[in-house]
Image (cartoon, rainbow, N blue to C red):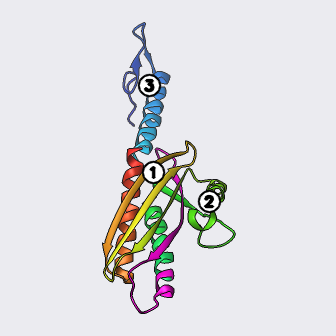
Amino acid sequence: MFFSSPTRDVVPTKAGTYNHMSMVRAKVLAAICGAVLSLASVPGLSAAPITIAVADFDFVDTSGEARDQSAEHTARVAKFAELVRENLSAQGDTSVLAFECPRHPCTPISMGSDDFLAAARRSGARFVIYGGIHKMSTLVQGGLVEVLDLQNEKLLLKRTVSFRGDNDEAFARAAMFVADTVREAMKER
């Protein structure tokens, strides 16, 4: 049989004798510190996710096209907000909370700013994203996206965006760009 010597896996005490319990405590402490440090380095675990409410977006068409496309645009703008929500929540660093209002669209223009802010605060989110899209011509869309810090009542981001095309793909690309822009702005806060 093999027996370990009394000096193996033990640490010397101040008096020069060896204390096995000191070594056990040191190993346990090192294991705990290592586990804590490894958890702190895991993305998403070191800080709570940012809470965001994404409101609906307004839409204005001044292109002057003869064909009525209001139903198509209503669907695209609703999908635009949905894609922004999905894209923001996909990374795990943000928690997108529901934005409830009595009637849609839930925007500052349709609700009035006081009711809009009250609805945003009821969501429990720290930040609210809102804006609008303007169809200027057959091919060109422009928009405005804003991010408001509800806790500090401070506008964090006011960004104009433009994109070409008036189809589902163009709106989807623009929504991904908006979500990425918002995410970058949140990192800088």
Q: Is residue 47 magenta?
A: yes
Foreground: 9 or 120?
Answer: 120
Foreground: 107 or 172?
Answer: 107
Magenta stretch: give its range: 45-74
Discs 2, 3 touching: Cβ within 8 Å: no
The answer to whether residue 99 is left or right of residue 47 is right
The answer to whether residue 14 is left or right of residue 74 is left
Q: Name which residue type carries label 2.
A: Phe
In this view, the mark in front (3 or 1):
1
Residue designated by label 2: 116
Q: Name which residue type carries label 1.
A: Gly
Q: Is residue 158 above or below residue 28?
A: below
Q: For the residue labelled by badge 3, is the local secondary structure a helix, a strand or a loop? A: helix
Which circle marks residue 44 in the picture?
1
In this view, the mark in front (1 or 2):
2
Q: Quadrant of the C terminus?
A: top left
Of mark 1 and mark 2, the one earlier in the sequence is 1
In this view, the mark in front (2 or 3):
2
Q: Name which residue type carries label 3.
A: Met
Of mark 3 and mark 1, the one earlier in the sequence is 3
Q: Total label count?
A: 3
Of mark 2 and mark 3, the one earlier in the sequence is 3
Q: Is residue 70 above or below residue 151?
A: below
